[in-house]
Amino acid sequence: MKRPYDHDPMAEASSNARVTPAVAECRINALGNDVLLRAISFLEARQLVQTCVLSRRWRNLWRSVPRINATHHEFDGMAESDEERSVLFKKFTNAFLKLGDPVTLDAFRLNYFMPGYQESVDPHAESEDANLWIQHALQSNARSVEVEIWNGDLLLNAAVGCAIYDIEISSETVKVLSIDDSSYFTTDKRISISISSLSYLVFSASARMPLLKNMGSLVAASVSVDLDAEDAREFAMVPKIQQSYSPDS
Amino acid sequence: MEVDKGKGEAEETRKVAEADRDTVTLKSSDGKLFEVSKEAAARLSTVLAGMIAGGSIDDNGTDLKQIGSEALENVVDYCNKHANSIPSAALISSSISFNTAPFKEPEEWERKFVDRLSHDALFDLVEAANFLGMERLLDVTCHKISEMMKGKSPDQIREVFNIKNDYTKEELEEIRQELAWAFYDD
C-alpha cells in the first residue's frame, strides 16, 4: 500500500479552512444512488471503478453505472509499449463489463487503440475484443454506443459505425445512430438502415443516401450525403428529416 | 429575463402573469414566490409538466416544500436561461425532449451557470433537479460533480466532498487485490 488511505479527512478539511471553506457535512453521500451513479458515470471507466475505495457507501456503485466511458488514454504511461498498454486496457474492459451489472447500461463509449492492427495478418482477430464489448453494450439495451478506434479499422460484426462493411444496419433497441465523416463504406451499394427503435439519426458521409426503413420512432435526423437525382426524390418524401446535403455530385 | 428577477419582483411579475397565464408561480419551502414560463417548466421538468397537465398548479404559488429559495431561484433561472439559449442551439437536440436525448456535454452557459455555485448550492440544486425530474439540469449538475473528482486521487476526492473513510486497512487491501485490473499499482 502506497497511499495513506487511513488519514483523517476531517482534520485535513479544517486545516484548509482558510483557503477553501470547510464543508460542514458530506453532501455527496446524502445523494440517492441513482443521482450518485449519474454523477460518477461521467468519469472515465478506470477512475470510476476506483471510486470503490472512497468509503463503504461507494464499494459497489461502479457496478451499476448507466454510462461506461472506456478509453485507452487512462492507461497512458502505464506500460512500456503500446502492446502492453493494450493488454492492460483489454483486461480492464473485459473485467469491467463482466463484473458490472449489465441491466442498467444506457450508454457505452469506447476509445480504443489497436496496436497490432498494422502488422496483423488477420484484422478480424484484432477487432474481436471490441466487437464483444460493443455486442455486450447492445445486448444491455444501451441507447447510445459510441466507438472511436485508433491505429486501425474496426471490423464490426454488429455494424454500428467506423468502417462499415455491412450494407444493412438493423437493431431493435438502438435509439441513436451517428455515422459521420470519419466512417467510410467499402461498398458502392446503398446501405440500408432499419431500426424501429431509432429516435435520432445523424448521417454525414461520402456515400449515397441510405435506404431508411422502419423509422417509426424517428424524432429528429440530420442527413448529409452525396445526393443524386433519384435519391433526392425519395429523400424529399422521408418525413421529419432536417435536410442538409452537399450538392457536389 | 434577469438572474434575480424571481426574488424581488416575484409579486409584480405575478400580477402581470395572471393576465395571460403563460407562467406558473412556484413557492419555496421558506415561502418565497418565483415565476417561470409555463412552457419552459413543462419542457424541462417532468414533475411540473405533470402538475400543469393535471391542473394541480396553484395560482397563488405551488408549494415546493422540499426546495429552499436559493435552489428554487437557481431552478427558475436555469429555465429562463435555457429558454433564451434555444435559438442559438442549432443542434438537433434543441428540438427534442431532454428527457430522452442522450447526454451532451454542457454548453458554455451551462458550465458558467454551475461553476458560480457554492458547494452547498450545487448540491441543493442537484437535489432540486432530481425532485422536479429535470433530466438535463440533473445531468449538468452531476457532470459538475464528476469534474470535481476528475483526475484526483481517492484522498483528494474525500477531501473535496468530506467523505469519511470507514474502511479498515485490511478491507482496502482486499478490494485492491480483488479489483487489481483497475489499479495496477504494484
Image (spheres, coloured by chain):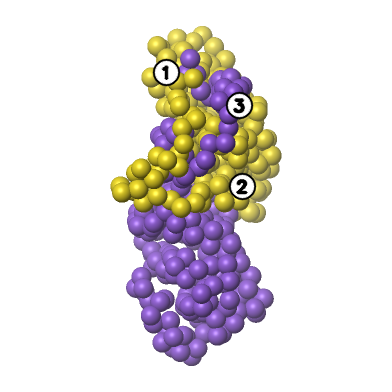
Chain colours: A yellow, B purple
Amino acid of disc 2: Asn
- Determine if residue A127 is in view: no
Mark 1 residue type:
Met
Whole-Å distance between the Cαs marked 1 and 3?
25 Å
Q: Nearer the viewer, mark 2 or mark 1?
A: 2
Badge 3 sits on which subunit?
B
Return the residue nearer the eye: A5 or A32: A5
Give the number of the mark in front: 1 or 3. Answer: 3
Residue A175 picture location, percent across and down: 60, 47
Of mark 2 and mark 1, the one earlier in the sequence is 2
Write down the residue under mark 1: A78
Q: At 47% across and 65% down in the image, what residue appears? A: B71
- Work out whether residue B77 can be spotted: yes
Residue B152 drawn at (x, y percent): 41, 35
Q: Chain of mark 2?
A: A
- Secondary structure at numbered mark 2: helix
Instruction: Identify the residue under disc 2.
Output: A33
* Label placed on residue A190: none
**Where does the image place residue A168, in percent across and percent down from the top left?**
61, 35
Pointer 2 and pointer 1 on the same chain:
yes
Question: What residue would you read off at disc 3?
Answer: B171
Q: Nearer the viewer, residue A222 or A48?
A: A48
